[in-house]
Amino acid sequence: LGLAFTYLRSDPLVEVATPYLADLRQTCQHRVDLSVLDGFDILYLVRLQTRREAFGATLVGRRMPVFCSSGGRAMLSRLPDADARRLVEASDRRPLTPHTIVDVKKIMAAVRRARTDGFAISVQECLVGEIVVSAPILDKQGNARAAVHIAMSFADYDERTVRERFAPMAVDTARLIAGGGY
């Protein structure tokens, strides 16, 4: 725990992003996360919950596969198609839920849509009952350095509503963090 504290306290991304993430959580009233790409996974650095949720789903340090997470797809969308495809093909694409997409062509279609939209959505692929929208945080060269996530109950919101209402919030917050010195 001491090592995690030291790392998170000294990470400039966490320092810059946290106030923006807190504002986003206040605005959207849902769990807000910050993740980075780490090999074939995303790694959560900040997780701000708003209501009682599954304990394991709210812990910093949790890993999720890049191929099926909205944050992973958001970050993959900023890679050249061939590089993103290689990472997806090399991933252990075991399904996490009955809704997890494991077909490379379908995953790459979702990555391409994220590239066009500027955000990615994952519907019940990592956790049954959860829909998540994520936007990449870009550096000055346009490379994804992290992703902002907004997670909510699929029972409360459908994909269309998430696209229209919450995706712009995630994209705006990602831009603010990128412009805030990270």
Image: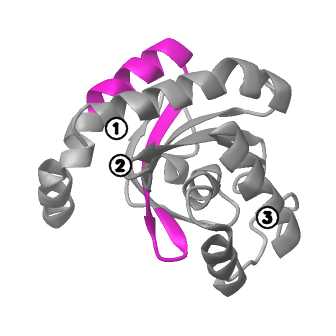
User: Under tag 1, what secondary structure?
Assistant: helix
The amino acid pointed to by label 3 is Ile
Outermost residue on the top side: it is 27
Residue beneath disc 2 = 139
Image spot of residue 112 (x, y percent): 75, 55
Q: How is the image coloured?
A: one colour
Residue 19 lies in what quarter of the image? top left
The amino acid pointed to by label 1 is Ala
Residue beneath disc 3 = 107
User: Under tag 2, what secondary structure?
Assistant: loop
**Magenta-tinted stretch:** 18-42
Residue beneath disc 1 = 178
CB under 8 Å between discs 2 and 1: yes
Is 17 rendered above or below residue 70?
above
Is 26 rendered above or below residue 70?
above
Quick check: is 11 in the magenta stretch? Answer: no
Name the residue: 78% across, 65% down: 108
Tell me which numbered mark, 3 or 2, is placed earlier along the sequence: 3
Relative horizontal placement of residue 76, taking residue 47 as reference (left or right)? right
Q: Nearest the camera: 170 or 32?
A: 170
Calculate the distance from the C-alpha at mark 3 to the C-alpha at mark 2: 24 Å
Relative horizontal placement of residue 111, taking residue 32 as reference (left or right)? right
Name the residue: 60% across, 66% down: 66
